[in-house]
Image: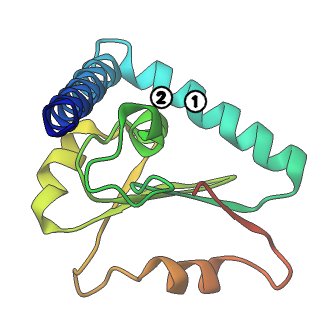
Amino acid sequence: GREARDFSSHVSALRTALACSSALAARSRLQRRCLGSSRGAELDEHLATLRRLMAQRGIQAYIVPTDDPHLSEVPPACFARRAFISGFSGSAGTALVTAGEALLWTDGRYWIQADKELPKSWTLMKAGAKRTPEIAEWLRTKLANGDSVGIDP
């Protein structure tokens, strides 16, 4: 009865805690790998691969947000797509890739971190700064009518 339910809920809570700590450990390993010595070359290869896929599918711009499909506060490591493509490990930011540009929007809390982590092939877009356009505004001014924008959910 009640004891079995209590035990079951404790086991469930323990499993959840272990899964979360495993996800955080995996995310930490991913971040360390992204920040390793061959970081720039590896990230440039990820970017080149994404651009090839975009060209094959007729996509002119591709958005990679921080969020996972469930809008988790701390997305599991398997959803760290923005860190994978850009190397930026901060908890807030959105990447945008076109055939000729790779941009990362993040707020003032992460400008220094992003400046350190982004490869030279990326441009930091300082969200909230006076002369920094919002992503939608940037897309309106850079893309032509009929161009396609993809998003990694």
Which residue shows up at 67% across the image and 39% down it? 50
According to the image, what is the colour scheme of the structure? rainbow
Identify the amino acid type marked 1: His
Cβ–Cβ below 8 Å for labels 2 and 1? yes
> The C terminus is located in which quarter?
bottom right
43 with respect to 33 (left or right):
right
Q: Is residue 128 left or right of residue 40?
A: left
Label ID, residue 122: none
Residue that protrudes farthest toward the front in the picture: 1
> Dot 2: few (<14), some (14–19), or many (≥20) neighbours within 10 Å?
many
CA–CA distance in space, label 2 to label 1: 5 Å
**Image spot of residue 22 (x, y percent):** 26, 21
Q: Residues within 10 Å of mark 1 (few under 14, many from 20)?
A: some
Q: Which mark is residue 43?
A: 2
Give the vertical position of 49 relative to 32 (above or below).
Answer: below
Name the residue nearer the viewer: 23 or 82: 23
Q: Amino acid at mark 2?
A: Leu
Quadrant assignment for the N terminus: top left
In the rendered view, does 17 fall on the left or right side of 119?
Answer: left
Residue drawn at the location 13% of the way across and 32% of the way down: 3
Report the residue that reaches farthest toward the top.
Answer: 37
Front residue of this view, candidates 94 and 114: 94
User: Foreground: 5 or 15?
Assistant: 5
Give the secondary structure at mark 1.
helix
Q: Which residue is found at the position 21% from the left and 30% from the top?
A: 4
Residue at 48% x, 41% y: name it.
Answer: 81
Report x, y in % for residue 144. Answer: 78, 81
Picture coordinates of residue 65, whole percent (x, y)? 45, 58
Q: Secondary structure at mark 2?
A: helix
**Residue, disc 1:** 46
- 36, above or below 20, in the image: above
